[in-house]
Structures are given as structure tokens and as C-alpha cells.
Image (spheres, rainbow, N blue to C red):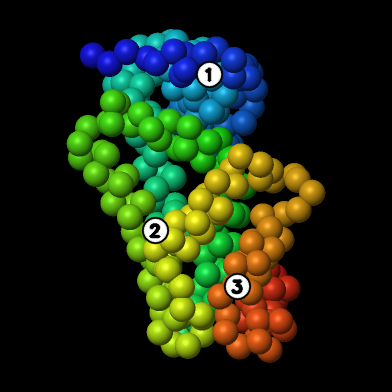
Amino acid sequence: MSTEPDARRASASNAPRASGSAARESAPAGSTRRDELLTVATKLFAARGYHGTRMDDVADAVGLNKATVYHYYASKSLILYDIYKSAADFTVAALHDDPTATARETIYHFTRRLLVGIASDIERAAVYFQEGPYITEWFTEEQVAYIRSSETAVYEHVRDVIDRGIASGEFFECDSHVLALGYIGMTLGSYRWLRPQGRRSAQEIAVEFSTALLRGLIKDEAVRSAEPLGIDVKTTAAAND
């Protein structure tokens, strides 16, 4: 049996405490009991850490006894896995592309979908990344393989889009492996500071991120200066509202 490192124990003890009433209030209307448990547990894990949250805490926050919680989730690790799987499935689903889109348009649309999704569920993203180094302790080999394959799919998609832009002459020659890793860190790491009610919306930040990245990639000077995203942002935003 693994033991909890001191650093994680200290981190959990110093994390903001999510109250049961606050967690209950944030559960979406019309959700099933299992959905409610997952929503509440996600907020508790984000605030206290996985090790800092007990099943009793989840039961108390939802207003159930622990036996009922175990009816829906046989272990705390299964709750965590559902959080991970939900995040992984969302990210992979965001990969869908318009086959007629250029490489630069594809990068912008993917960035927008990612950031809007992260902003809609900051706690889920926080749990995914803060507990990431330790999932091999808590998940089965099959569960870990599912998560890792999803992460690989995201990396390969971004790399392949960059390679497509290079091959078509749209982008400068570059190391697509390094750039893809940097892009993933830039976008997915935004959960640390991205807020739904912040100074800039997720849509606006996606425009800023994509513009900065693409202006370093696009070969054509006129395109790079005038229309790096390749689309009308206002029209696209309205279509997705």
C-alpha cells in the first residue's frame, strides 16, 4: 500500500476548504444523484486534494449517509476516475475538425473549444492536473491506459495539424513536436487563472492565444498581419452562442 508524501499532505491541509452547503448549491439542476455526487466530489477534490477528502466529506456535502454514497461509487478512486474520464473525453471530443478548414483555422477552433470548456468546469481541470502525477497509485492499468491514450490523441492531433500547415506551405518549418507540447501546456494550463467571470472571456483569450501562436507560424506576411485566424471571429462567436 502506498503512503501519502508529506508534500501532498501539507498541500491538502492548506487548501481552501469547500463547505458542504457551497458544494450542494453548485450541483446542476436536474442532475441525477450520481451526477450530483460527482459534481460535489470534484469541488471537494479541487479545494482539499484527493487525499484530503474523505468519503464522509462527500456524503456530508451531498446530504447522504456514507452507505448510500458507496452504493453509487464503491470507492473514492472510482469517483476520481470518472472525473478524469470526463475531462479526457471532453478534450478528445474537442478535436473534431472541419475537413475544409485550413491549419490555422483548425488551431483557432480547437483552442476556442478547449478554453470555453475549461472555463465551464474549472474544478474538473484543476483536479485533473493536480492529481495527475499520482494516478498510477489509484487507477487500474486499464484506467491509466485510457487516460494516457486520450492525452496522446490530443498531442498527435495538434502535432499533425502543425505538420499539415508546414506541408501545405501555410506555416514556416518548425519542430512540430516541441510546438505541440508548448501549445498543450499553454492552453490546458489556463485552468490556473482562467475564470468564467474574469476580465476577458474564454472566447477572447482563445483569440489572443491563437493570434500570438499563429503569427509566429504563418509564412505569408499579409495573412500573418491581417487575418492570422483565417475567420471572422465575431461571426464565429455568434454562430457558437
Label 1 belongs to which residue? 11
In percent of width and height, residue 78 lies at 32, 28
Which residue is located at x 60 percent, y 54 percent?
116
- Amino acid type of disc 1? Ser
**Count of numbered tags:** 3
Label 3 belongs to which residue? 216
Query: Gap between marks 2 and 3, in whole Å?
Result: 21 Å
Q: Sequence-wise, which precedes: disc 1 or disc 3?
A: 1
Which residue is located at x 52 percent, y 65 percent?
110
Q: Sequence-wise, which precedes: disc 1 or disc 2?
A: 1
- Amino acid type of disc 2? Val
When asked about the image quadrant of residue 91, the answer is: bottom left
Residue in front for this viewpoint, 170 or 173? 173
Label 2 belongs to which residue? 154
Mark 2 crowd level (few <14, some 14–19, many ≥20, 10 Å Cα): many
In percent of width and height, residue 150 lies at 33, 52
Query: Gap between marks 1 and 2, in whole Å?
Result: 29 Å
